[in-house]
Amino acid sequence: MPEEDKEGKQFHQDVPAKQDGFFLKGCNSLDWGIKNRLSQIFNPISGKTVMLAVDHGYFQGPTTGLERIDLNILPIAPYADTLMLTRGILRSTVPPSYTKGIVLRASGGPSILKELSNEGLAVDMEEAIRLNVSALAVQVFIGGEFESQSVLNMTRLVNQGMRYGIPTLAVTAVGKDMVRDARYFRLACRMCAELGAHYVKTYYIPKGFDTVTASCPVPIVMAGGKKMPEKDALVMCSKAIQEGAAGVDMGRNIFQSEAPKAMIQAVAKVVHENLPPKQAYEMYLDLK
Ligand code: R5P
């Protein structure tokens, strides 16, 4: 039997309990579990995230820089806030002692040889819970051949995830022939958010990106896209953050860099500490 409790007096009646809002845009009405998982992705101090995307193999096989995730990616993973990957790579290659955020690729189907928008859901919720992931990612092809199918993949994932407190990241995929302008990205990002995505990944555009972030009621993370010179990639990151992005989800511009470890550290400084791109590039060169 525990000893009888002697009633304490520390009620602090004069100190009202803190009623903080949640730090992420549009996420205040979510439940505790989902907010907790989002906090494994976004740093609650800066409000931003550096996601390292290494899921390219789910439709294009061993992409340059990802031939050996154990050798190329694990050494730089500690510098990211979150890894974005498939369950195959997670189980086979990432040690379970890794405790940062995991965003699991949950859609798939076609290879690069076929129509990419013809995706289905490729992971179920039980598996996501078993793997203890922080969020699930699904591709949404607005304007694509299988547009509605991909949107409904997303809404299904949102519905299932809401039952268990697992957030959904909608990834806006742009077909090769589609115009990448602010009007398109406003449409795509807003649709994803309206239909329930908890945050959205989209591309940076030089004109009007701020209107894309402003008109999306949930956080937007910037996709990296094709490899470009490190200096340009850092400028793009900085502009995206200044224009309202809540972080980045970059792959090739990090793991295909001449010095991935230096590059990811420079990106993190831009994202979390607003380091100007010129200084970030100097930092990259020093570390390299
Ligand atoms: C989208 O198709 C996948 O999530 C990619 O693996 C990811 O967006 C690619 O990242 P990046 O374009 O920065 O290489």
Image (cartoon, grey):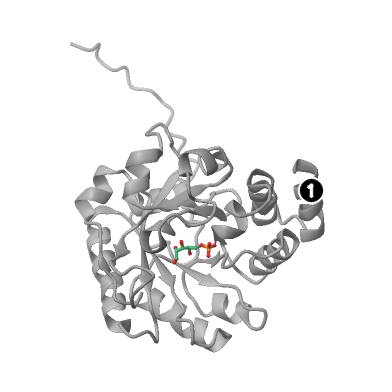
Q: Does the residue labelled 1 lie within 8 Å of ligand 1?
A: no
- SS class of the residue under badge 1? helix
Please say if 115 is above or below 108. below
Which residue appears at 77% of the width and 60% of the height? 277
Front residue of 265 and 43: 265
Q: Would you name the residue on which mark 1 appears?
A: 285
Q: Residues within 10 Å of mark 1 (few under 14, many from 20)?
A: some
Which residue appears at 71% of the width and 59% of the height? 230
The residue sitting at the front extreme is 113
Expressed as whole percent of the image width and height from the top left, the position of residue 50 reads: 56, 53
Instruction: Tell me if 214 is positioned left or right of 164 in this view.
Output: right
Displayed quadrant of residue 146: bottom left
Which residue appears at 40% of the width and 74% of the height? 193
Please say if 115 is above or below 63. below
Which residue appears at 44% of the width and 59% of the height? 56
Please say if 6 is above or below 125. above
**How many numbered badges does the structure rendering display?**
1
Instruction: Tell me if 116 is positioned left or right of 264 in this view.
Output: left
Expressed as whole percent of the image width and height from the top left, the position of residue 66 reads: 49, 50
Instruction: Tell me if 287 is positioned left or right of 146 in this view.
Output: right
Instruction: Tell me if 238 is positioned left or right of 61 in this view.
Output: right
What amino acid type is highlighted by mark number 1?
Leu
Displayed quadrant of residue 166: bottom left
Front residue of 16 and 283: 283
Quadrant where the image shows the C terminus: top right
Expressed as whole percent of the image width and height from the top left, the position of residue 53 reads: 49, 56
Quadrant where the image shows the N terminus: top left
Expressed as whole percent of the image width and height from the top left, the position of residue 128 reads: 27, 50
Front residue of 92 and 77: 92
